[in-house]
Image (cartoon, rainbow, N blue to C red):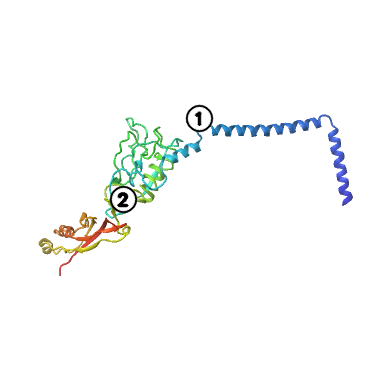
Amino acid sequence: PAGFIGSLILQLRISVANTVRRPHVVSGMAAALLLVVTTILAVLVLEKHTQKASAAVGSDDDLSLVEILDFQNNEIPRTDRGIGANGKGRVGFADGNGEGSRPEPAKAHGGGSGGAGNPLPPSQGRPPQPSEIPAPIPTTLIRLPQSLPEGGIDIDPALWSKLSFASYGDPRSKATVPSNGPGYGGGVGTNNGSGIGEGDGPGFGPGRKGNIGGGDRSIGGGGGSGGPGGDNPNPEDPNRVWTVSQVATRARVLFKPEPQYTEEARRNQITGTVILRVVFSRSGEVTNIRPLQSLSGGLTERAISAARLIRFVPATRNGQPVATYMQLEYNFNLY
C-alpha cells in the first residue's frame, strides 16, 4: 500500500508540472483569482454604503416598511386600556359607569381590525355606526352615488356615539393622511377584518370576533355608556360604582322593609319574585333602581317603593365610603 500511494503522488506531481508548463495557464489562474477578490470587495463596499444611507434618512419617502410599522405602533395603543379617543374611558365615546347594554355589570370584550394593504398607518377618524352587516370603511369623503353600503362595525350600540371627525377612521390615531392601514378586509387597522384597530374581526380594538375591548367577543353590562377606563380605572372618581368583589367592606343593611301585596295581585293570585338591580350609594341611599324580573298587579312598583326605604352603612374602599351595585329579591307568596 505504501508503494502504491507513493506512485499516485508521483503521478500527480508530474501531471501538475505538465499543466503549469502549458502557455497562459499561470496568467489565467491569476486573473480568475483577481476577479473573484475584486467582486467580493465590491459587494462589501456597496453593502456598507447602503447601511450608511439607511441610517441617514432625510424624508418620509426614504422610510422602509419596517420603520413605518414601528411609527404606527407608536401611534396606536396595543393594550386594552383606554380604547377610545385620547384614552378616555373603556370605549371613550361617552362618560359613565357602564360597560354595555346588558343589565348585569360586566366588562365588554372583543375587537376588530382591517385595512387595504396600505403601508401608511390607519388615519384618524370616527367609527361608523354600529351594524352587524360588515361593509367597507372609506377613510376619504364619501362621494355619491355609492355602489356599496355605508360602512359599519359590529359594536354594542350602547358604547357608541358619533365623534366630531370629518371622515371614518381610528379615533386613537394621530395620522392625518387618509389610509385604511396595512391590514386587509376592508376595515381600518393592521390585521384582518372589516372593523377598526389591531385585533381581528368586525369590531373595534385589540380583541377578536366583534364588539370592543380585547379577547373574544362578549357584550358588557352596566349601563348605556362607556366605563371609566380599562383594567385600571380611575380609583379617585367619587361617582364610580364598584362591584361587591372590588370593595374592602360590603354595605351593611340597617333597615329593610318588606313590600305589601296589592289588592289586584291578591285578587288575581299573582305570586313570584321581583328582582331589582340597584346602587347602594356612598351617601346611604338606594338609587338607579332597575327591574330585572317583574310581576304584574303592581307588585313590581311595591318592591321598588320598599327598596327606596332601605337604610344601610355604605361599602368602603381604601377607608372611604363608595357606591356599589346590589341585587335585591322580593318574594311574593299567598298563604
Where residue 58 is drawn, which disc sits there? 1
For discs 2 and 1, the disc positioned in front in the rendered view? 2
Residue 107 locus on image (x, y percent): 33, 52
Mark 2: few/some/many CA within 10 Å (<14, 14-19, 20+): few
- The residue that appears at 81% across and 29% down in the rendered structure is 24
Rounded to the nearest angstrom, the CA distance separating label 2 from label 1 is 46 Å
Can residue 183 be seen here? The reply is: no
For the residue marked with disc 1, what is the amino acid?
A: Gly
Residue 291 locus on image (x, y percent): 21, 56
Q: Nearer the viewer, residue 157 or 277?
A: 277
Q: Earlier in the sequence, mark 2 or mark 1?
A: 1
Where residue 236 is drawn, which disc sits there? 2
Secondary-structure class at tag 1: loop
For the residue marked with disc 2, what is the amino acid?
A: Glu
Secondary-structure class at tag 2: loop
Left or right of 326, for residue 65? right
Q: For residue 126, what is the image quadrant? A: top left
Left or right of 5, for residue 141? left
Which quarter of the figure is the C terminus placed in? bottom left
Residue 97 locus on image (x, y percent): 28, 50
